Image (spheres, rainbow, N blue to C red):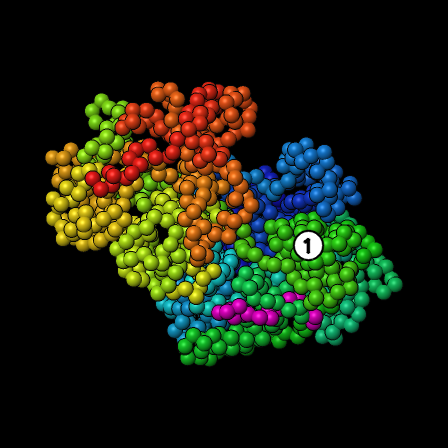
């Protein structure tokens, strides 16, 4: 097909370089500089999609990110990208595009039956329909019909990047306002980032016909860009959308690549101030059957004509309720396009507009409205009414303009507020968020002169606020002078007529809005969710204002009283690839390795993944299996000395005047009164009183604490501490510092551990008198700074040695060399779990779950005796926490000594062996004890402490066996070995 709608001249395209592409298998041509939407329109293709709900034919509607209809699938195979806006896709050689809805084809879609039976599917029908008889009956059909596009099944071959940046000023939008502001700020010395979503900077000047200093506006754009590019303090980011604004002046930007190095880059920008020069989005008009292909926004029609040299039709009608659409008529006339008429809803059309149309012989119909449109897959004509007169017009394109809505989504992300301007019939900034400034059309300016002047003023103001000298820049002369008024007439709504679309993307109509009012959904957020207006891919960019006007008219409330819905990030969709850039595979969950990994490998360690860390499970010697190796390691610790690498242990330092008070509120145990150099075991609860972590609290100095967390909970607990510090107790003076990776931790455990330490070159006194159980000290060991805790997770005499991680390999080797004569044995996690099980020490996450409170594991009295408040204390007095038959931690011995115990087995009630039966609890951890010569276990048993000595039946994988309930501690209950 020839490009029969391509204008003979004009545009920013390169007519010397054509590009071949295809749409739904049809081979087409365009030019370098085209967007996919422009190339389709140039080839006369308007019908590109089917609507979401009724599968009505839909065409290209806009020229930017607000496009609600033209969502296409681009590429093939693993390169396939669904839901690509044709208006934002640059045309490339060989590009393959397909429509996403329509079976068996776009032209003949059987799902159009939903349109012919549309009265059965009003807003909210799914909530009332799909619950009878149950959701599962409908689920398969709904899932097959729902959705826009198909997610690729193959691995994504594209490469994505992430980066961070800092600046004084982030300018969102590279149009005339953004360029002027960047020039002022750049000259003043501010570090500036200027981002614009288009392929080129210029904004509206890319398709406006205004002259600056009697030259085309793009000459001025090129001059400003040349000055900005020469400034080292200014960064220009074309093809970059500012997608979100978050607290503390943090913004995310999505940049599209322009070569094969990467497809997209997600920027995280921290700035001192943000300037919104984002412009405005044209709004649609509401009239019966206003969704046909061939109906476009008037500004988009200008855009295609002036930038891409494309006529959207051969017989064009313009419908408007404001002045701006008249420029569309002038531009189309200048390009030789036949403009049939301008349909103006206003009774009193400004004389200047009438004169302009008279000059180009275009008919103006004031006080007129569209009664209906006709056509199938392309607009063919309109039925209109002017006063009492009804008439028809034949046309193949309709340009509509319902006014302009400022792009203020980013301001709303930052919790700025909006006000409704009755003159412009749009929301404008009311209260700016801290650090935010707004200029240009986003602030309500309607002419280019106003835009340039305000941009300079606002930019100078923020420069002064940031401590830079205000500067003046040369303001170009704008011609011809713009006579447009910003006034917009209220959109005339014809409630007596059905099938008037408010939201093209979600197929929501004026009738849906009326139904929402009848059903009581008149609060704006309820209205949004009932009708789904503004909830689709365009987030209401072209439909929200009309929806709010409709709600205002239906309820009789002023739109300022109704308000607006909440805009949430992102402004436009962000691909999962960009969000996950560099964080897939190993990048998503890196295999964290110990600093002493090389030494562990030399010891033939068998590694397993524990909480993301590659840690030694056990160290088999020649011809040993796993069980033999584990038993040998356990016995070595009990009889001589073993060394265990516990470096992944969470290590978090708490500093500050209120450090003790902060931890006193965090932990169930007392922290006030803990002396310097003392350690204390502590339980951490959540607000529900449930145990979420445990560890040792060490007081290093009066205002300096070190807390240990479980290895898998280090990052989780760090986030929790930060949350309580920043949001709940900001008055407390505390600084939280994660030093987990800074220190490697080696545990020496066994009756000869002190003897080994005393052989090392150290200034620390390791004697029992100087370093008792639950005490800490620091000093030098083998020339290294060391922190030493006398604590034990094995029940043996034990020392935890913390040394700088960079020396871990050499330090571990030195320990092994010094202890060789004693038979020092490295032991892994399996041996450690057996050692702690023999002592009955619980392991948070294994022996506890999301219901376990302190009393369940024997800490109830300590929890209630602490007078001061702490997180979770209140919940310990709830009825559920005080129930007498809660599951409690107990020890388990098989009645038959050779019986193997495994975690996961359930206790049956009484002596019954019949299943199914209500579980009385379960075995939480189990292992073979080489010291006792049998399997032992811990379990959570209902009312367990009252059942000590009883025999219970365990059901495990189809088998039944008896166990005896005993106290949790199996070895050395008097703790004599701690002082061996």
Q: Quadrant of the C terminus?
A: top left
Residue in the foreground of this view, choosing between 884 and 540 = 884
Mark 1 closeness class: few <14, some 14–19, many ≥20 residues within 10 Å: some
Given the current orientation, which residue lies at the most extreme right position? 388
Residue beneath the point at 48% across and 62% down: 247
SS assignment at label 1:
helix
- Give the mark count: 1
Residue in the foreground of this view, choosing between 723 and 591 = 723
Left/right of residue 591 with respect to residue 418 in the rendered view: left
Q: Is residue 262 above or below residue 622?
A: below
Q: Is residue 269 visible?
A: no
Left/right of residue 45 with respect to residue 196 in the rendered view: right
Give the labeled residue for mark 1.
526
* Position in image of residue 168 (x %, y %): 42, 68
Q: Does 331 appear in magenta?
A: no
Q: Is residue 535 visible?
A: yes
> Which span of residues is magenta-colored?
422-438
Q: Is residue 284 above or below residue 580?
A: below
Residue beneath the point at 86% across and 59% down: 390
Residue beneath the point at 49% across and 34% down: 942
Q: Quadrant of the N terminus?
A: top right
* Position in image of residue 617 (x %, y %): 30, 33
Q: Does 431 appear in magenta?
A: yes
* Position in image of residue 355 (x %, y %): 73, 73
Left/right of residue 270 with respect to residue 214 in the rendered view: left
Residue beneath the point at 27% across and 60% down: 701
Q: Is residue 587 above or below residue 718?
A: above
Left/right of residue 633 with respect to residue 682 in the rendered view: left
* Position in image of residue 718 (x %, y %): 39, 52
Residue 901 location, quadrant: top left
């Amino acid at each position: 097909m020839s490009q029969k709608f391509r204008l003979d001249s004009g545009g920013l395209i390169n007519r010397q370089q054509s590009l071949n592409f295809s749409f739904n298998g049809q081979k087409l041509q365009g030019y370098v500089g085209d967007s996919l939407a422009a190339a389709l329109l140039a080839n006369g293709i308007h019908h590109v999609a089917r609507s979401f709900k009724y599968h009505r034919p839909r065409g290209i509607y806009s020229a930017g990110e607000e496009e609600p209809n033209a969502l296409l699938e681009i590429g093939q195979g693993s390169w396939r990208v669904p839901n690509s806006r044709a208006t934002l896709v640059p045309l490339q050689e060989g590009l393959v595009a397909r429509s996403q809805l329509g079976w068996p084809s776009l032209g003949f879609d059987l799902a159009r039956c939903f349109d012919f039976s549309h009265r059965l599917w009003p807003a909210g029908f799914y909530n009332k329909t799909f619950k009878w008889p149950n959701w599962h009956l409908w689920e398969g059909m709904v899932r097959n019909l729902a959705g826009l596009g198909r997610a690729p099944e193959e691995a994504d071959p594209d490469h994505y990047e992430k980066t961070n940046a800092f600046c004084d000023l982030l300018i969102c939008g590279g149009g005339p306002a953004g360029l002027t502001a960047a020039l002022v700020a750049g000259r003043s010395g501010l570090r500036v980032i200027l981002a614009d979503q288009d392929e080129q900077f210029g904004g509206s000047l890319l398709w406006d016909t205004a002259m600056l200093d009697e030259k085309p506006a793009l000459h001025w754009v090129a001059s400003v860009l040349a000055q900005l590019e020469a400034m080292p303090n200014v960064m220009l980011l074309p093809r970059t959308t500012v997608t979100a604004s978050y607290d503390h002046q943090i913004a995310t930007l999505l940049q599209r690549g322009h070569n094969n190095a990467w497809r997209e880059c997600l920027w995280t920008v921290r700035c001192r101030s943000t300037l919104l020069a984002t412009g405005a989005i044209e709004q649609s008009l509401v009239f019966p059957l206003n969704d046909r292909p061939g109906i476009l926004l008037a500004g988009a029609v200008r855009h295609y004509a002036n930038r891409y040299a494309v006529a959207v039709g051969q017989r064009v009608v313009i419908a408007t309720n404001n002045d701006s659409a008249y420029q569309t008529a002038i531009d189309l006339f200048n390009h030789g396009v036949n403009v049939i008429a301008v349909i103006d809803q206003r009774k009193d059309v400004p004389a200047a507009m009438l004169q302009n149309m008279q000059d180009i012989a275009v008919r103006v119909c004031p006080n007129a409205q569209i009664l209906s449109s006709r056509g199938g897959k392309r607009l063919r004509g309109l039925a209109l009414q002017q006063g009492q007169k009804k008439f028809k017009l034949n046309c193949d394109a309709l340009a509509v303009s319902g006014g302009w809505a400022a792009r203020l989504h980013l301001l709303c992300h930052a919790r700025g507020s909006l006000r409704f301007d009755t003159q412009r019939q749009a929301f404008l900034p009311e209260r700016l968020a801290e650090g935010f400034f707004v200029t240009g059309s986003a602030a309500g300016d309607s002419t280019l002169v106003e835009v340039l002047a305000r941009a300079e003023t606002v930019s100078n103001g923020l420069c002064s606020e940031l401590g830079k000298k205000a500067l003046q820049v040369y303001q170009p002369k704008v011609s011809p002078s713009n006579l447009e008024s910003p006034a917009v007439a209220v959109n005339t709504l014809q409630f007596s007529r059905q099938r008037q679309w408010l939201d093209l993307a979600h197929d929501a109509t004026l009738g849906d809005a009326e139904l929402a009012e009848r059903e009581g959904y008149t609060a704006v957020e309820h209205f949004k969710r009932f009708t789904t207006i503004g909830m689709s891919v365009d987030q209401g960019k072209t439909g929200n204002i009309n929806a709010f006007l409709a709600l205002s008219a239906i309820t009789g409330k002023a739109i300022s009283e109704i308000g607006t819905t909440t805009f949430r990030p992102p402004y436009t969709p962000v691909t999962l690839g960009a969000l996950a850039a560099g964080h897939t595979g190993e990048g998503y969950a890196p295999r964290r390795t110990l600093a002493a990994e090389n030494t562990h490998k030399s010891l033939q360690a068998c590694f397993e993944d524990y909480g993301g860390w590659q840690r030694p499970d056990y160290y088999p010697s020649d011809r040993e299996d796993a069980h033999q190796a584990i038993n040998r390691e356990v016995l070595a610790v009990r009889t001589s000395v073993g060394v265990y690498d516990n470096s992944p242990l969470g290590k978090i330092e708490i500093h500050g005047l209120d450090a003790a008070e902060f931890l006193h509120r965090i932990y169930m145990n007392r922290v006030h009164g803990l002396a310097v150099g003392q350690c204390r075991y502590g339980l951490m609860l959540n607000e529900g009183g449930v145990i979420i972590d445990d560890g040792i609290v060490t007081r290093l100095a009066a205002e300096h604490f070190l807390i240990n967390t479980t290895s898998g909970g280090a990052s989780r607990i760090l986030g929790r501490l930060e949350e309580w510090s920043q949001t709940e107790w900001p008055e407390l003076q505390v600084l939280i510092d994660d030093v987990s990776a800074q220190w490697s931790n080696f545990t020496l455990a066994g009756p000869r551990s002190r003897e080994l330490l005393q052989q090392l070159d150290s200034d620390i006194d390791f004697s029992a008198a100087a370093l008792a159980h639950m005490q800490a000290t620091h000093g030098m060991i083998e020339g290294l700074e060391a922190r030493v805790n006398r604590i034990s997770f094995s029940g043996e005499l034990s020392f935890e040695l913390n040394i700088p991680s960079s020396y871990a390999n050499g330090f571990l080797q030195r320990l092994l060399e010094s202890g060789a004569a004693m038979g020092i044995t490295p032991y892994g996690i399996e041996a450690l779990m057996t050692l702690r099980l023999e002592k009955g020490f619980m392991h948070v996450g294994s022996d506890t779950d999301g219901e376990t409170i302190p009393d369940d594991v024997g800490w109830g009295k300590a929890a209630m005796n602490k007078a001061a408040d702490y997180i979770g204390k209140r919940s310990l007095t709830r009825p559920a926490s005080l129930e007498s038959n809660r599951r409690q931690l107990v020890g388990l011995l098989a009645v038959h000594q050779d019986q193997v115990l495994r975690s996961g087995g359930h206790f049956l009630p009484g002596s019954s062996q019949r299943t199914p039966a209500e579980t009385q609890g379960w075995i939480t951890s189990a292992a073979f004890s080489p010291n006792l010569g049998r399997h032992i276990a811990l379990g959570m048993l209902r009312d367990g402490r009252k059942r000590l000595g009883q025999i219970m039946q365990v059901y495990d994988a189809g088998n039944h066996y008896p166990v005896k309930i005993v106290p949790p501690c199996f070895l050395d209950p008097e703790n004599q070995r701690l002082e061996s």
